[in-house]
Amino acid sequence: MDLYDQYIRTINDFPIEGIKFRDITPLLANGDAFHQVIMDLNKELPSYENWDKIIAAESRGFIFAAPLCSMNNKGLVLARKKGKLPLVGYSVSYNLEYGSNTIEIPKDAIKPGDKVIIIDDLIATGGSAKAMVDLVKEAGGIPIMGLFLIELRSLQGYKQMGIPVVSIVNYGLHVGDTLSINKGKFLTCKYKEKVDEDDIRVVYEDGSEDVINKSSIINIIQKDMNGRIGYIKYRD
């Protein structure tokens, strides 16, 4: 069992029925595991001269952004909930499933031309992440990438951001994911849809379709901006 499987706890039916809550508190409580998280996130950062600051969302984003900024001698911008800052520079509202939320950044926290990385613990639908992108742009900064500990792939929040997105731990699949499998007509296929809790429908390279068990999935195959192929561990 790898570190993330060991220390990220899945709580079923929280906060509402049907939701799988990915609880990172055991990961944070273990010193060695938390250190490894920061090292893994740090490896995904651009080279030193290609970024200036990190913007992080209240509140779990602060946990990861602060040590990364300290390690790299870079500035930290706190995106706080409305009413928490004495001097507000910019404010953006975004929609939630029920209602809306507003986040704000301090006055003068981002200078025109600053190259800024967006960080949070998790990206789901991408609402709060997109709001941080908008805050950076309103301040005259340049959002260059999103970096997350966890991504819920089925919700495709990365599409909201319009910038490269990297996640350390991925759960689920989104339509069009290319899969490496150990059982099937071919050893690669594309995910089409969920059939039930155990099975998915896939499309092979010849256009034929099949229903396979999730246990057949080895990895998700993904290309980066430069066309290089990488492999993402599949987690359900």
Image (cartoon, rainbow, N blue to C red):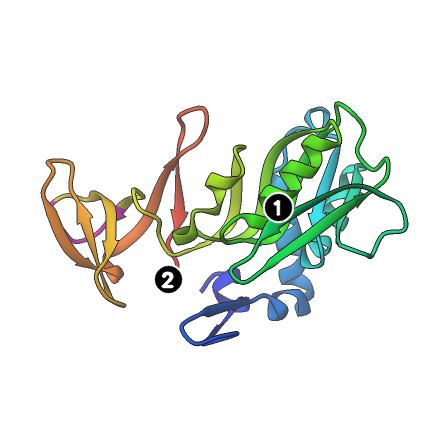
Q: How far across and down, in percent of the image, does residue 215 sit?
A: 26, 62
Residue at 79% x, 36% y is 74
Identify which amino acid the numbered label 2 is placed on. Answer: Asp
Q: Is residue 183 magenta?
A: yes
Residue at image point 14% right, 43% down: 186
Going 17% across and 57% down the picture, which residue do you hit?
Answer: 212
Question: From where the camera sits, is residue 40 visible?
Answer: no
Label 1 sits on a secondary structure element that is: helix
26 in relation to 223, above or below: below
Say which mark, if any, is on residue 221: none
Measuring from the top left, give residue 150's x and y in whole percent.
Answer: 53, 54
Task: Bin the neighbour count of mark 1 within 10 Å (Cα to Cα): few under 14, some 14-19, many 20 and up.
Answer: some
Disc sitting over residue 236 in the figure: 2
> In the displayed structure, would residue 230 be above or below residue 128?
above
Q: Is residue 147 left or right of residue 187?
A: right
The secondary structure type at the circle numbered 2 is loop
Callout 2: 10 Å neighbours few (<14), some, many (20+)? few
Per the picture, the main secondary structure of the magenta-coloured stretch is loop
Q: Identify which residue is drawn at 37% across, 38% down.
A: 222
Q: Is residue 189 left or right of residue 90?
A: left
Q: Please state the horizontal and vertical placement of residue 32, each as a whole percent of the image.
A: 66, 62
Magenta segment boundaries in residue numbering:
180-185
Q: Quadrant of the N terminus?
A: bottom left
Q: Quickly name the residue at label 1.
A: 41
Label tally: 2
| Cα distance between the residues tagged 1 and 2 | 22 Å
Q: Are marks 1 and 2 in contact (CB under 8 Å)?
A: no
Q: Front-most of 185 and 174?
A: 174
